């Protein structure tokens, strides 16, 4: 408990963590490039980022883009923000909030790309609406993404993946839709840059295939 409280104190003082205790938390919507990054570079967000392996991995590969990891857990964000500082990554921020509130922090068409990396699969039927690829979340993502921006999902969970495929195939506003049930043995593999999260390593070691899909919304 003491370690967790200490980490909460640390991220409260870090400029690369946007959380409720900071004034910028309530006025960052639509102003990420101007008020935080001080540039006009494209924005990628990783939702339910955990420790932010993708946020950090992508930011180190593409310094001319801005990356924001979004999660509610302060201890996880502490880890990602620490990695960003250790690597001197000025194109990284972490936002501490629930994904359900994401529209309060990003303006319409402010985001160029969204990653969902190993989100909670919510396997119970009563939790279907809480899955991050359910219709209400997809509606949010469509508003946030710029025209032509990709949404990408990477998961080990078959139930979530098949649910997402079915949901997308029922829509009439999806374009450039590609997917694989085994990213390590598929031509789409380069799109994931071989960045692996802690969960991915664990699941792959158990023999789980890693699934991946990406698409764009039609305007």
Image (cartoon, rainbow, N blue to C red):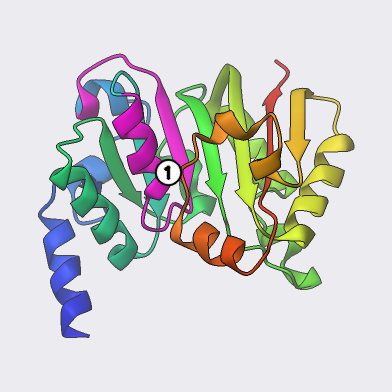
Q: Which of 145 and 159 is in front in this view?
A: 159
Camera sees residue 27: no
> With respect to residue 168, does 101 lie above or below?
below
Q: In this view, does 159 lie above or below 178?
A: below
Q: In this view, does 133 lie to the left or right of 27?
A: right
Query: Where does residue 101 sit, x and y in percent of width and height?
Result: 48, 50
The residue positioned 78% from the left and 61% from the top of the image is 159
**Quadrant (top left, top right, bottom left, bottom right) of the N terminus:** bottom left
Q: Which residue is drawn at 45% across and 23% down?
A: 110
> Is residue 197 found left or right of 138 in the rendered image?
left
The quarter of the picture where residue 29 lies is top left
Badge 1: few (under 14), some or many (20 or more) residues near its Cα, within 10 Å? many
- Residue 97: horizontal and vertical position, in percent? 39, 54
Judged left or right of residue 123, residue 49 is left
Quadrant of the image occupied by residue 217 = top right
- Magenta residues? 36-62
Percent position of residue 81, x then y? 23, 50
Residue closer to the observer: 216 or 145: 216
**Does the stretch in magenta take in 27?**
no
* Rendered residue at 27%/40% (across/down): 93
Q: Is mark 1 on a helix, strand or loop?
A: helix
Residue 137 seen anywhere in this rendered image of the structure: yes
Camera-nearest residue between 78 and 138: 78
Residue 198, given in percent of the width and then of the height, sits at 45, 61
Q: Mark 1 points at which residue?
A: 54
Against 80, residue 44 (above or below) is above
């Amino acid at each position: 408990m003491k370690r967790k409280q200490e980490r909460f104190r640390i991220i409260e003082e870090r400029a690369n963590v946007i959380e409720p205790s900071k004034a910028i938390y309530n006025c960052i919507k639509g102003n990420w490039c101007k008020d935080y990054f001080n540039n006009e570079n494209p924005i990628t967000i990783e939702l339910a980022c955990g420790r932010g392996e993708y946020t950090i991995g992508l930011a180190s590969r593409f310094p001319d883009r801005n990356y924001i990891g979004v999660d509610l857990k302060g201890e996880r964000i502490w880890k990602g923000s620490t990695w960003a500082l250790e690597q001197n990554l000025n194109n990284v921020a972490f936002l501490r909030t629930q994904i359900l509130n994401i529209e309060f922090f990003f303006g319409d068409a402010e985001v160029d790309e969204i990653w969902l990396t190993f989100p909670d699969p919510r396997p119970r039927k009563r939790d279907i609406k809480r899955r991050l690829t359910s219709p209400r979340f997809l509606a949010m993502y469509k508003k946030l993404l710029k025209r032509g921006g990709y949404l990408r999902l990477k998961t080990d969970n078959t139930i979530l993946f098949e649910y997402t495929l079915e949901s997308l195939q029922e829509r009439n506003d999806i374009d450039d839709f590609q997917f694989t049930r085994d990213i390590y043995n598929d031509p789409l593999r380069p799109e994931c840059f071989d960045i692996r999260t802690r969960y991915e390593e664990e699941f792959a070691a158990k023999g789980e295939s890693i699934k991946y899909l990406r698409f764009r919304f039609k305007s």
